[in-house]
């Protein structure tokens, strides 16, 4: 007989077993990339902001995708559930110290984001109207490994197109139930209908609308969060002290409990931090590869800035709202409900409604973005039509409804498991190919020092791999 509790426990144990070593691998890779790029994420912050205004020249009368547009696409998939619900889940599981580990993984992970997005640009391929690329492409054309590139394509489809969509729908349903007392089953049905309508035909039109609504909601949430923090600015020193003490188990019960508290804070903070900023996960490079730039490093810097924007800015605001409210202690709630209650504690009942509406737009646009990542990688695997049809039904229908009805811990544990496998696969590739990203950042700096305002890269600059660089042969 099927035992759902036993299956849930098995998935949780698998996710925990995978993440204990992966947590250290992520940190080690971040430190390694930071050193080898000579602290690119700190030394070139000014250049990151400058590049946001970089506009490509028209090609064949058509305007290519700019650096800023690729940045906006990746930020749209980053900012959302992870910033509002993921931060609360991290605090509920790992305590206030989890916030510090989210900051750590963002600070050093931004170097990892730089490397993976630079490689995505280096190995991108030409299509009729744009470029396409990502980890599956730099694994295939850089490592020349068909099985590993196919493995990555399958894993990102399972992670984003399926498991992450269940997290998005679960978060929407939780927020709507908390604010308006809507039954999750009915909300799930509505989300399924809208999702299927989009993925079966209206995705471009709805995506354009979302690209306007989502930034407005994000800015609105950010301003509201800043107001809450400003209202409680005198308490900020105590909150910061709480975060740093809890991150290392200071003030906890002596002995084994100290190690457990620190380990719980690290694991929760790193997992939720990665879910939110996606540094090293291999998702943002899919968007980064579409930009038309004169040098691969430009998009690497842009995506590195995206990690800072997501975690150090938006996630921090959510963390401060929750910690300033104090409701995280002894609360049976986690996820989006904790964020809603914390904001209501600060601004009244309207806070619950605002978060519900905001997460509806954030999470729903993420469902669209997640589907795009999945379909792109399915097309990498096959040109047949039927796998796309099956994926649309599973992504927009089955998994969305599953997320609406499943427990919060179950959908997050499934997401954590596949996210871990996906990240591990991508890290293998970028560590192997990282030497080309290191050379490229040196080349970029050399040209800047020589007085060249807009550094240029051509395939012939790297003769050893020139034949693999399809997009840079002009």
Image (tube, rainbow, N blue to C red):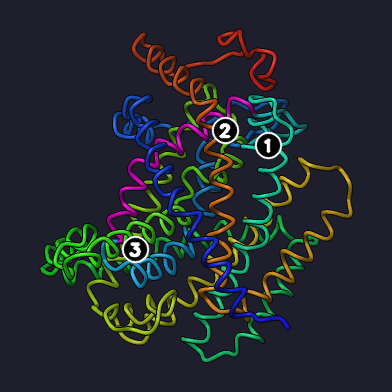
Image coords of residue 263 (percent x, y): 32, 59
Image coords of residue 161 (percent x, y): 67, 58
Foreground residue among 126 and 223: 126
Which residue does the image show at 83% across and 60% down from the upper left? 390
Residue position for label 2 = 429
Task: Please name the predominant secondary structure of the magenta segment in the image.
Answer: helix
Picture quarter with the N terminus? bottom right
Q: Please tell me in which quadrant of the rendered image residue 301 appears.
A: top left
**Residue 135 inside the magenta-drawn segment:** no
Q: Earlier in the sequence, mark 2 or mark 3?
A: 3
* Secondary structure at numbered mark 3: helix
Q: Using a 10 Å C-alpha cutoff, classify the residue at mark 3 as few (fewer than 14 neighbours), some (14 to 19) or many (20 or more).
A: many
* Secondary structure at numbered mark 1: helix
Foreground residue among 348 and 125: 125
Q: Please tell me in which quadrant of the rendered image residue 85 appears.
A: bottom left
Q: Are marks 1 and 3 in contact (CB under 8 Å)?
A: no
Which residue does the image show at 29% across and 73% down from the upper left? 322
Residue position for label 3 = 264
Q: Are marks 1 and 2 in contact (CB under 8 Å)?
A: yes
Q: Earlier in the sequence, mark 1 or mark 2?
A: 1
Image coords of residue 321 (percent x, y): 28, 71
Residue segment shown in magenta: 98-123
């Amino acid at each position: 007989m099927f035992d759902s509790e036993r299956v849930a426990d098995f998935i949780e144990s698998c996710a925990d077993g995978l993440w204990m070593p992966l947590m250290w691998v992520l940190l080690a890779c971040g430190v390694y990339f930071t050193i080898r790029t000579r602290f690119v994420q700190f030394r070139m912050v000014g250049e990151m902001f400058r590049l946001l205004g970089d506009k490509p020249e028209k090609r064949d009368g058509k305007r290519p995708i700019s650096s800023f547009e690729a940045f906006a696409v990746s930020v749209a998939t980053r900012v959302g559930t992870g910033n509002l619900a993921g931060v609360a889940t991290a605090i509920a599981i790992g305590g206030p110290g989890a916030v510090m580990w989210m900051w750590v993984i963002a600070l050093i992970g931004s170097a990892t984001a730089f490397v993976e997005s630079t490689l995505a640009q280096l190995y991108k391929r030409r299509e009729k109207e744009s470029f396409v690329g990502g980890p599956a492409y730099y694994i295939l054309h850089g490592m020349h490994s068909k099985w590993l590139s196919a493995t990555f394509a399958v894993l990102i489809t399972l992670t984003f197109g399926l498991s992450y969509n269940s997290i998005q729908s679960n978060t929407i349903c939780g927020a709507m139930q908390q604010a308006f007392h809507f039954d999750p089953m009915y909300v799930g049905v509505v989300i399924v209908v809208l999702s299927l309508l989009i993925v079966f035909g209206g995705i471009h039109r709805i995506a354009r609308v979302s690209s306007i609504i989502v930034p407005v909601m994000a800015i609105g949430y950010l301003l509201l969060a800043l107001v809450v923090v400003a209202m409680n600015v005198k308490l900020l020193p105590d909150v910061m002290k709480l975060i740093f003490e809890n991150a290392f188990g200071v003030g906890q019960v002596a002995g084994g409990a100290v190690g457990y508290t620190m380990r719980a804070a690290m694991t929760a903070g790193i997992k939720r931090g990665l879910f939110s900023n996606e540094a090293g996960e291999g998702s943002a490079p899919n968007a980064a590869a579409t930009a038309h730039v004169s040098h691969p490093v430009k998009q690497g810097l842009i995506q590195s800035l995206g990690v800072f924007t997501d975690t150090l800015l938006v996630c921090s605001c959510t963390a401060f709202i929750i910690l300033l409210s104090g409701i995280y202690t002894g609360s049976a709630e986690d996820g989006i409900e904790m964020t809603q209650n914390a904001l209501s504690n600060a601004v009244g009942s309207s806070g619950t409604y605002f978060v519900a509406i905001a997460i509806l737009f954030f999470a729903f646009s993420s469902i669209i973005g997640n589907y795009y990542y999945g379909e792109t990688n399915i097309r990498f695997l096959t040109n047949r039509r039927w796998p796309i049809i099956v994926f649309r039904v599973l992504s927009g229908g089955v998994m969305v409804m599953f997320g609406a009805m499943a427990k919060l811990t179950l959908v997050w544990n499934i997401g954590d498991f596949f996210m871990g496998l996906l990240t591990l696969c991508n890290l293998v590739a970028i560590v192997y190919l990282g030497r080309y990203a290191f050379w490229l950042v040196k080349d970029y700096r050399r040209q800047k020092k020589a007085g060249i305002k807009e550094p240029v890269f051509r395939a012939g600059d790297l003769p050893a791999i020139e034949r693999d660089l399809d997009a840079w042969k002009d």
